[in-house]
Image (cartoon, rainbow, N blue to C red):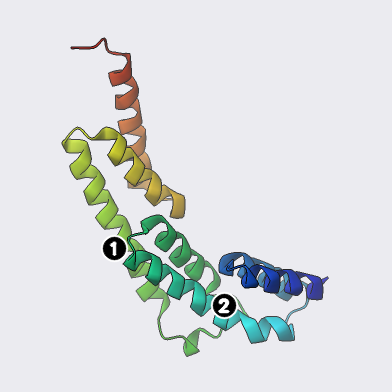
Amino acid sequence: MADKLFAEGMAALQEGGHERALELFSAAWQEKPGHAGVAREFDGTLLALKKNGDAAYALGKWEDAGKRWMGTLRFLTHPAANARGYPFTRSEVKSKVDRLSAALMEKALTEYRRGEVPAAIADWKTILSYDPGHVEAARSLQTASKQLETLKKMPPGK
């Protein structure tokens, strides 16, 4: 079973699915701790996932960046990970996520204050797509969504 999971992980990796590959590698490791293939591929795959997050951020693809950085954080503490050999630390990646979320929160609040409620809602949804536990974004999204529904129910010209 472990070898099958590892092979599926390698297939996902060939298709550019780094996070999916890490999920499958983790499952293979759970079935067979110390799996040689996982030990060989895990670090490079995790480094590529983080690097893809950096590249997505540079291109302004906030959601992709956030998802890839959160995936990096999720797998950084896996037993197959050799975190001491990485050119970044957990706190550095967490800091990137926090800065991204803070910038999107500020952008959303500015849009909200200008009356651009749908744009603000989109930004809060972006944060929640990679960080579902972000309390402030969830609360702001709920408030703005209710306001948008109220505005839609108002007769024109009011």
Residue 126 visible within the image? yes
Q: Is 134 left, or right, of 43 in this rendering? A: left
Q: Secondary structure at mark 2?
A: helix
Q: Give the residue pinned by disc 1.
A: 99
Q: How many marks?
A: 2
Q: Residue furthest top?
A: 155
The crowding category of the residue bearing disc 1, from other C-alpha atoms within 10 Å (few below 14, some 14 to 19, many at least 20), is: few
Q: Looking at the picture, which amino acid does disc 2 mark?
A: Thr
Badges 2 and 1: C-beta atoms under 8 Å apart? no
CA–CA distance between discs 2 and 1? Answer: 24 Å
Quarter of the figure that contains the C terminus:
top left
Q: Is residue 136 above or below residue 66?
A: above
Residue at 28%, 20% in the rendered image: 151
Q: Is residue 145 above or below residue 101?
A: above
- Residue 80: percent from the left, percent from the top? 62, 81
Residue at 36%, 34% in the rendered image: 142
Q: Is residue 126 above or below residue 155?
A: below
The crowding category of the residue bearing disc 2, from other C-alpha atoms within 10 Å (few below 14, some 14 to 19, many at least 20), is: many
The image quarter containing residue 114 is: top left
- Residue 104: percent from the left, percent from the top? 28, 52
- Residue 155: percent from the left, percent from the top? 26, 9
Q: Residue furthest bottom?
A: 85
The image quarter containing residue 42 is: bottom right
The image quarter containing residue 11 is: bottom right
Q: Residue furthest left?
A: 114
Q: In terms of sequence position, does the residue under pointer 2 or pointer 1 come before the other?
A: 2
Comparing labels 2 and 1, the label whose residue is closer to the camera? 2
Residue at 29%, 63% in the rendered image: 99
Q: Secondary structure at mark 1?
A: helix
Q: Give the residue pinned by disc 2.
A: 45
Q: Is 138 left, or right, of 26 in this rendering? A: left
Residue 134 visible within the image? no
